[in-house]
Each structure stands twice: as structure tokens, then as C-alpha cells.
């Protein structure tokens, strides 16, 4: 995930160089962000711009998640586009320091050895691409709130109606109607 771009920096604006993401430099995710289930894969095209290097491509990250309904662990893959700018800190020809861009927050530095480290850029984009609600499958039935049985494996003996979430609103309406009748 670290690529030397010295040759590309010496090339004319518009030159591109394709790289494949490898597993050699593992991406570290912070606690609570996500847990990787395998190596990150993808291909990036590095474009020489008049500012530095612009990287574009698609990245796929296999991740472990816990279903928010049944709490079971499952693996899934998240694919997301990457479009990030990298700016030089050292002039590749003269070796003199290069002034940072106007807004360094929007780009990542190319180190003194003329390498771009894509890990931080990938991490930031991965975190944004993570699903807000992790479900082991779209129609996961979840757990019984009383006995904790996984309803995906069948109903439990609890004396409560197993009601589909979609009917929950209807049930509330009916309960409301019954309450009025009782008065
Ligand atoms: Zn589930
Ligand atoms: Zn139950």
C-alpha cells in the first residue's frame, strides 16, 4: 500500500501509473471502526498532476461485523471509490523542500523518499463507506427480547406474538382501538 512515485513525479503532467494494493503493509483500523476479515484489494491509477499525484480507483475491504439484530458475527465486503490527492514535500529533482499546498487538509503528503502511503486515505474512505446498520441479511429476524432465542432458527415458546416489524405500527393502532373500546 506504499508506492514509490519518484519516476512518476519526474514525468510530465498527465502521465499515469497503475498500482495494485497489496497486503504487505496492513491497514490498522482503530477500535470500534471495523475489523478487517482479510487483505484489502484494489487497483489505483496514479495521475501526475501539476500539484502532485492524484490517485483514483476502487478499493474492496473484507470486514467482520456484528449483526445489530441477532448479534451474530458475519463477514462482508465493502467496496468504495478512492479519489485522493497527494502532494510532494521534497522536490524530486533538486531535493529541496516544497511548500505545502494552500489547504493541506484536503491532500496527503508524499514522504521524503517520494513514497505515497495510501493506508490513511483508504482508512478514512473505508470508515465513511461502512454500513450504518449492519445486518447479517436483509430479513434477519433478530433475537427474542424475552428468552434471547435467535428467531432465525425458529420461533420460541415465549407467550408473545412474534410480529413482523412492518406490522408493529398496525398492531399499535389496533391496541389503541381496543383501549378505546375498553373505556
Ligand atoms: Zn442477524
Ligand atoms: Zn422467546
Image (cartoon, grey):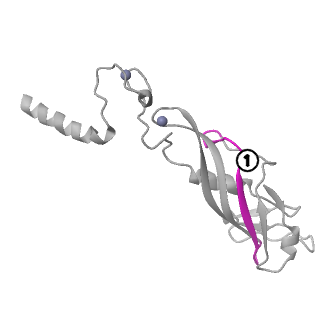
The quadrant of the rendering that contains the C terminus is top left
Q: Nearer the viewer, residue 132 or 42?
A: 42
**Residue 18, placed above or below residue 143:** below
The spot of residue 62 in percent (x, y) is: 64, 46
**Residue 143, placed above or below residue 134:** above
Q: How many marks?
A: 1
Classify 10 Å Cα crowding around label 1: few (below 14), some (14-19), many (20 and above). Answer: some
Residue 91 can be seen in this image:
no
Q: Nearer the viewer, residue 20 or 50?
A: 20
What residue is rendered at 45% in x and 44% in y?
A: 138
The spot of residue 53 in percent (x, y) is: 76, 70
**Magenta residue check for 44:** yes
Q: Is 88 left, or right, of 154 in this rendering?
A: right
Q: Residue 66 sits in which quadrant?
A: top right
The quadrant of the rendering that contains the N terminus is bottom right
Q: Nearer the viewer, residue 49 or 76?
A: 76
Q: Is 50 left, or right, of 57 in this rendering?
A: right
The spot of residue 79 in percent (x, y) is: 61, 55
Q: Residue 151 sits in which quadrant?
A: top left
Judged from this view, the residue extending furthest toward the right is 94
**Magenta residue check for 53:** no
Residue 92 can be seen in this image:
yes
Judged from this view, the residue extending furthest toward the front is 154
What residue is rendered at 56% in x and 49% in y?
A: 130
What's the magenta region? 31-52
What residue is rendered at 69% in x and 57% in y?
A: 121
Q: Is mark 1 within 8 Å of ligand 1?
A: no
**Residue 136, placed above or below residue 123:** above
On the image, numbered disc 1 is attached to which residue? 27
The spot of residue 94 in percent (x, y) is: 93, 74
Q: Residue 105 sits in which quadrant?
A: bottom right
Looking at the image, in which quadrant does ligand 2 appear? top left
Amino acid at each position: 500500500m506504499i508506492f514509490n512515485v519518484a519516476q512518476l513525479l519526474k514525468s510530465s503532467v498527465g502521465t499515469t501509473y497503475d498500482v495494485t494494493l497489496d497486503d504487505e503493509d496492513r491497514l490498522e483500523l482503530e477500535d470500534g471502526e471495523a475489523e478487517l476479515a482479510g487483505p484489502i484489494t484494489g487497483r489505483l491509477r496514479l495521475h501526475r498532476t501539476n500539484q502532485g499525484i492524484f490517485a483514483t480507483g476502487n478499493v474492496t475491504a473484507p470486514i467482520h461485523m456484528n449483526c445489530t439484530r441477532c448479534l451474530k458475527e458475519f463477514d462482508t465486503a465493502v467496496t468504495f471509490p478512492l479519489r485522493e490527492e497527494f502532494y510532494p514535500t521534497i522536490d524530486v529533482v533538486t531535493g529541496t523542500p516544497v511548500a505545502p499546498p494552500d489547504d493541506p487538509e484536503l491532500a496527503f503528503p508524499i514522504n521524503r523518499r517520494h513514497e505515497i502511503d495510501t493506508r490513511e486515505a483508504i482508512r478514512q474512505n473505508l470508515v465513511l463507506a461502512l454500513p450504518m446498520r449492519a445486518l447479517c441479511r436483509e430479513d434477519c429476524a433478530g433475537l427474542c427480547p424475552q428468552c434471547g432465542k435467535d428467531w432465525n432458527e425458529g420461533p420460541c415458546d415465549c407467550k408473545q406474538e412474534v410480529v413482523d416489524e412492518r406490522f408493529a405500527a398496525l398492531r399499535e393502532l389496533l391496541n389503541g382501538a381496543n383501549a378505546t373500546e375498553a373505556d
